[in-house]
Image (cartoon, helix red, strand yellow):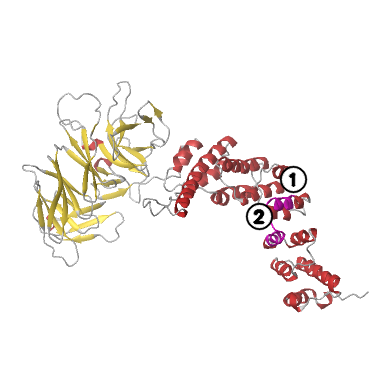
Amino acid sequence: PDVFAVRSGGATGVVVKGLEDRNPISFRMEDKGEVKCIKFSLGNKILAVQRTLKSVDFLNFIPDSPQLEYTQECKTKNANILGFCWTSSTEIVFITDQGIEFYQVLPEKRSLKLLKNQSINVNWYMYCPESSVILLSTTVLGNVLQPFYFKSGTMSKLSKFEIELPAAPKSSKLSLSERDIAMATIYGQLYVLYLRHHSRTSNSTGAEVVLYQLPREGSCKKTHILKLNRTGKFALNVVDNLVVVHHQDTETSVIFDIKLKGEFDGSTTIHQFVLPPRSIQPYQIPVADSSSWIVFQPDIIISASEGYLWSLQVKLEPVVNLLLDKGKLMDFLLQRKECKMVILSVCSQMLSEPERGSLSVIATVFDKLNHEYKKYLEAEQSYTMVVEAGLSRSNPLLKRPVRTQAVIDQSDMYTHVLSVFTEKKEAPHKFTIAVLMEYIRSLNQFQIAVQHYLYELVIKTLVQHNLFYMLHQFLQYHVLSDSKPLACLLLSLESIYPPAHQLSLDMLKRLSTANDEIVEVLLSKHQVLAALRFIRGIGGHDSISARKFLDAAKQAEDDMLFYTIFRFFEQRNQRLRGNPSFTPGEHCEEHVTFFKQVFGEQALMKPTTF
């Protein structure tokens, strides 16, 4: 949104400022009377100025084009222009008290061409730029609303609908004020929000906000009612798909989320506010008298008396302490734009004192997270299938699924929550293992392939607490799925739990891994002795490359390990060739030099003769 500051009709200057603008636009124009309405086209190429009830003046802001004004009068005789809206960079709609007129602006010709007009009695109008819909209030009472939709040169009439007034009006005068209506896109759908100051049912006190869903096709239907449980002056904003209702008397605001469960009465869902009323936290300047506030959709508040423009934002961190039901909190957070780090911190909190949750609560949270994660994986998978099948060209609307912050995958959980939680070691180990297994259960329930590092975390935790019987059971009953990294981890446990060696080899065989690949995997994990034991176990130690093992031993930066491996190959050379030294073909010269540097020449094995 831009704010225009017009001084003396524009003669002494016009300054245009927006929220994001680092450099405001300023210019001068002739003073031809009081400016009623002034707006730039999308892209700031053409300026439209309304000074009278009958016409709108235009001025091009295109480089190298003369700055001469041109005028368009409204077509309908005796009509007064209530206002105008730009629907694109060169298309404009005049709204008069007798209908709407849709024009194309031709800046190079400095003229306008009428594309379409429609006669209808208009009390007031409202425009939602996000959805390019204009809403007109018609009939004597003003409660029949007629929407029009604009897209690339076309104007379509959507189905009109009636707003239910609180009670049958006494007189036949305008009963629905523009102040009590807002239009906003919530969760991708366009809604008309009606602030009804008294409920239709006599027994309920307090105002309510009624939401009408406005589809492109089909009729508009009443879908939600937001209960305010208070009376007075209100204003509405929509931020991050939340409806925020400001109450002037108490200077507090309440938040509603129509995605959360409400009471369904067969046709509409009735919602109570998600969080207790709270005041808006001022940004840098104290928020003064709210009586001069003007609210614009979706999230703008202007303080006319002080000359400030604010954009409203929702802070998610405080919500965590206001919404104590963790399941409901997750439902709320997962729908927010910037939710990832807050969700991860909630997960960490519920695993640690003093707010440790029960396993059933933790399971609910994991399931809600994995439900979102699975939805994204499925969308990604079906997109990939369409692309690989070459069908994407025939479907130009196909878009890669957007990964929102609500998609919390295994690496997020591992890095920010589970690995930190297991390292803290403040929880009883049974609880720690139960939490890890609960997360794995949830992944399995949603048929998400579990990443090996989660299993490694389970194994490491079991080993730390000497729970080898449990580890054995988990492997025996395939609670921990087979994978090469897991097999390597088991091999490395052999020194503290001897059966791990066999468990590991069984796993590698189930994965039908080639022997040389097993050796490679072990060496890459610096499990040099385990690799050597494995090779000896299958009888292949006479043909392996000495250099490969010596390289790995040297990288491990453990002198005794290097000594052991070097000595093993010296002995092999002696056994196979009658001489412990390496042949030039084995390319081990640098390792021999290193051995001599560290252990001295006398440590080399002497050839033994029989």
Q: Nearer the viewer, residue 437 or 419?
A: 437
Q: How crowded is mark 2: few (under 14 residues within 10 Å), some or many (20 or more)?
A: some
Asked whether residue 352 is in view, the answer is no
Magenta segment boundaries in residue numbering: 503-522
Q: Quadrant of residue 293?
A: top left
The amino acid type, in three-letter code, at marker 1 is: Phe
For mark 1, what is the residue?
468
User: Label 1's element?
Assistant: helix
Residue 439, which numbered label? none
Name the amino acid type tagged 2: Pro
> What secondary structure is the stretch in magenta mostly built from?
helix
Query: Left or right of 237: which side holds 261?
Result: right
Horizontal and vertical percent position of residue 40: 20, 55
Q: On the image, numbered disc 2 is attached to which residue?
A: 485
- Please, which residue is most extreme toward the left here? 78
Q: What element carries label 2?
A: helix
Position of the C terminus by quadrant: bottom right
Assess disc 1: are there few (<14), some (14-19) or many (≥20) residues with their C-alpha within 10 Å of its C-alpha: some
User: Which residue lies at the image location 15% right of the left edge and 25% below the top edge?
Assistant: 171
Q: Position of residue 366 (x, y in %)?
A: 54, 41
Residue in the image at 47% along x and 54% along y: 388
